[in-house]
Image (cartoon, helix red, strand yellow):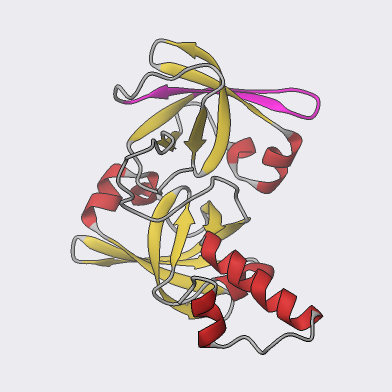
Amino acid sequence: MFTGIIQVQGSVVALRRGTQDARLTVALAAPGPDLAIGQSIAVNGVCLTVTERNGSSFTVDLSPETLERTTLGGVQPREQVNVEFPLRLGDSVGGHFVTGHVDGVGPILRREAAGESAWMWIGVPPFLIPYIAPKGSIAADGVSLTVVEVSGHAFSVSLIPHTLATTTLGRKGAGDRVNLEVDVLSRYVERLFAGQRLSAGPRLTREVLHEQGFA
């Protein structure tokens, strides 16, 4: 489990492709917690397992599913990536709960400066739109963000100077693609809706949501 608060950036050392899978090695830009073999780590929002550790570098395996559903199969040597270490018991949750299970990939459609901040509009695969709501949370390349507006098959976010300086979103613009993970709570709400539609139970109301802990 992660929170979408990027702790350090890393630089891609190598991406070694196999017949169907790949191995990715990343060098951390700054010291982080000790990484043990078998530990989870998030790279650009993708939950992966550390398989090798060498000084400030670590290696992870990319399955065919990861290569197909995320942007990691297209990273290049020296490219910067967002790295987050897993949440530990007792840690504060500064962003929102992020699982590292990417739901889809979206293109950055537009970016505009707003003083030292920036506006960014990101396209969304149609099947993900029902899970995205204004003022709700979403992770883009592992960065916890608050949705400002949803329009058609796109949403907008506001990037503060800290986010621009400490994550790879500060260097991305129109045409770049990002990994997207919707808020896990929206998935459970959708599950409730699906269950209501398949059963003869009561209509989904604010009272039902409150009983289930969602409102």
Q: Residue at left 38%, top 50%? A: 169
Instruction: Give the residue drawn at x 67%, y 78%.
Output: 193
Q: Position of residue 153 (x, y in %)?
A: 59, 75
Q: Which segment did they paint magenta?
A: 13-29
Mark yes or no: residue 32 visible: yes
Q: Could you tell me residue 64's position as x and y percent?
A: 75, 36
Residue 66: percent from the left, percent from the top?
A: 67, 40
Pick out the residue farthest to the left.
115
Q: Quadrant of the C terminus?
A: bottom left
Q: Position of residue 81 (x, y in %)?
A: 44, 37
In the image, is residue 105 part of the stretch drawn in magenta? Answer: no
- Answer left or right for 65 relative to 105: right
Q: Is residue 9 left or right of residue 105?
A: left
Number of callouts in the render? 0
Predominant SS of the magenta segment: strand
Which is more toward the observer, 183 or 102? 183
Left-right relation of 58 to 94: right
- Give residue 204's quadrant in the image: bottom right
Is residue 124 visible in the rendered structure shown here? no
